[in-house]
Image (cartoon, helix red, strand yellow):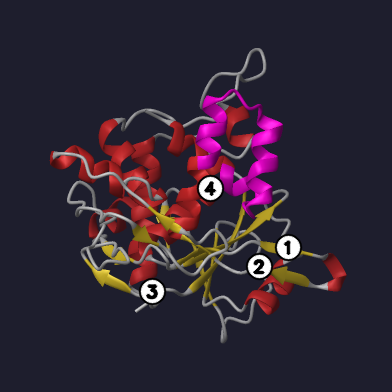
Amino acid sequence: MPGAAVPGGHATEGGAPDTYGHPAFAAARESTAVSGGRHSRPRRTRQGGGGGGTRRAAAGLPGPMLRLRAERHPTLVPALPFAPPPGDRPGGPAAVASGTAGISFAELDRRARSVAARLGATLSPGSKVLLVYPEGPDLAGAFFGCLYAGMAAIPLVLPAPGATHAVPRAVERCAPDLVLTGTDGWHALSVDRARTQVVEADGVRVAGEPVWRLAQQWRPVGVLRGAAAYHRYHDDGAAGGRLEAAMDHGDLAEVLTELAQAVRLGTDEENIGWIAAVHGLEEAVWRILLPVRVTT
């Protein structure tokens, strides 16, 4: 059933599960067809010999890719593949300001698992989750948490912590099943709690529970490659807002592959952003996902 999650595996169109619970990735099938997104077209995956080929096939999706990176490079901080300004250090404040996670693969995976565990206990697969955060590790953890849980993430990127004036419009236009935020404890969001649940999630606690505990409770679920993964929301101020059609997990994988190829060809940061925008990927999102994709 499109959009559904099944215990233990991330299902391909052919029915074989690709799990977000690395390392038990199931084998990808030849000529896997992906449907349901703007970038939909048949995609062929090479089947390598042994577990290595299986892992590479499954790791093409953003969620399993982070799981793989966390296993292989736990202490490495994913960074954008562009030269930082003089004096900046990888993973430092400049990286966070530019939208990358700014934390290690292991920590990003831990945050994602904790968010996914909470979402999975609350919502059905395919639910829409509004992410109300400024750029940085909390947004990155929440976004990957949605991918891990089989939910559709709708980022509402705040220009600064507490700048939540656009939240009521976003809730009205997007009708999310849940709002994830890191600011509710300090700046109460203008959300009707009787209609929409609000959960505070950061690097320490998710809904009041310690991140480390929830991360241990997470169990992999299967998500169809064609299941909705991400909606782009445009806030038009007083005029309202617009929610774009969903990109699925396969769409995200295709766009990231194209961006990674452009990086290898020496494309600069500005044009990487332009390519991402053409494919419907907003800046805060590609800056979270691309560093994970290009790490080897």
Query: Which residue range is magenta in the image?
Result: 258-286
Secondary structure beneath dot 1 equals strand
Answer above or below: position of 24 versus 36.
Answer: above
In whole angstroms, how far apart are the C-alphas of marks 1 and 2? 8 Å
Precedes in sequence: disc 1 or disc 2:
1
Tag 1–tag 2 contact (CB < 8 Å): yes
Precedes in sequence: disc 4 or disc 2:
2
Secondary structure beneath dot 3 equals loop
Viewer-nearest of labels 1 and 2?
2
For residue 266, which quarter of the picture? Answer: top right
Precedes in sequence: disc 4 or disc 1:
1
Q: Position of 73 compared to 172: left or right? A: left
Answer above or below: position of 266 versus 255.
Answer: above
Viewer-nearest of labels 3 and 4?
4
Under mark 2, the amino acid is Glu
For residue 225, which quarter of the picture? Answer: bottom left
To which residue does mark 2 refer? 244
Under mark 3, the amino acid is Pro
What residue appears at the point 53 percent right and 43 percent down from the top-left corner? 288
Q: In which quadrant of the rendered image does the N terminus lie?
A: bottom left
What residue appears at the point 25 percent right and 56 percent down from the top-left corner? 29
The outermost residue toward the bottom is 194
The outermost residue toward the right is 238
- In percent of width and height, residue 200 lies at 50, 62
Instruction: Tell me the crowding category of disc 1: few under 14, some 14 to 19, or many 20 or more residues within 10 angstroms, Cα based.
Output: some
Tag 3–tag 1 contact (CB < 8 Å): no
Q: Main secondary structure of the magenta part?
A: helix
Residue 209 appears in the figure: no
Instruction: Tell me the crowding category of disc 3: few under 14, some 14 to 19, or many 20 or more residues within 10 angstroms, Cα based.
Output: many
Under mark 1, the amino acid is His
